[in-house]
């Protein structure tokens, strides 16, 4: 019986070590994603000032707080779009161009409701790009 308790205790201690390792790995991944999202530049136009050569990675779409016309590139309203770009293309994304937005009607709303009501949300879409050197 004593031997079984020793084995169970050893397994419990080993399990805690694995949990801590996984926790550290998740924290590192979250930090890397946040750093990548912070450096992304969002533009409604075809270009990003100061970066004449761009490689298009592909289309992205994500939730945004309000239309990008009311945004500047560092606004938190585009964070959902930036995270969507990171989820799809990883840290290769330096910016998002040709950004526009549209209103998505919620399940409980009727089609006649106006944008900005509580029965829906704004989504943004654009093209993720990588800066060429």
Image (cartoon, rainbow, N blue to C red):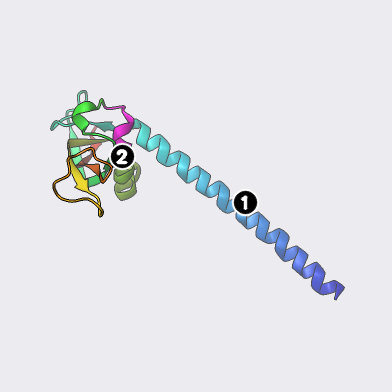
Q: Nearer the viewer, residue 115 or 12?
A: 115
Q: Residue at x 31, y 27 (%)?
A: 74
Image location (x, y in percent) of residue 92: 31, 42
Q: Secondary structure at mark 2?
A: helix
Separation (CA) of disc 1 from disc 2: 29 Å
Q: Which residue is mark 1?
A: 20
Q: Position of residue 102 (x, y in %)?
A: 17, 42
Q: Is residue 76 left or right of residue 23?
A: left
Q: Is residue 112 above or below residue 13?
A: above
- Per the picture, the main secondary structure of the magenta-coloured stretch is helix
Magenta segment? 73-82
Taking the magenta stretch, the answer to whether it contains residue 75 is yes
Q: Disc 2 marks which residue?
A: 82
17 and 51: which one is in front?
Answer: 17
Residue 114 vs 9, above or below: the answer is above
Give the quarter of the image for residue 35: top left
Q: Quick check: can you spot residue 21?
A: yes
Sequence-wise first label, 1 or 2? 1
**Disc number placed over residue 79 in the picture, else none:** none
Viewport quadrant of the N terminus: bottom right
């Amino acid at each position: 019986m004593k031997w079984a308790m020793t084995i169970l205790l050893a397994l419990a201690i080993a399990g805690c070590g694995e949990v801590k390792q996984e926790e550290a790995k998740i924290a590192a991944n979250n930090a890397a994603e946040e750093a990548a999202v912070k450096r992304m530049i969002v533009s409604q136009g075809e270009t990003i000032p100061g970066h004449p050569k761009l490689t298009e990675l592909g289309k992205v779409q994500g939730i945004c707080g309000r239309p990008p016309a009311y945004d500047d590139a560092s606004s938190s309203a585009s964070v959902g779009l930036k995270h969507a770009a990171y989820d799809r293309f990883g840290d290769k994304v330096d910016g998002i161009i040709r950004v526009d937005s549209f209103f998505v009607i919620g399940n409980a709303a009727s089609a006649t409701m106006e944008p900005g009501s509580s029965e829906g949300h704004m989504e943004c879409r654009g093209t993720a790009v990588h800066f060429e050197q």
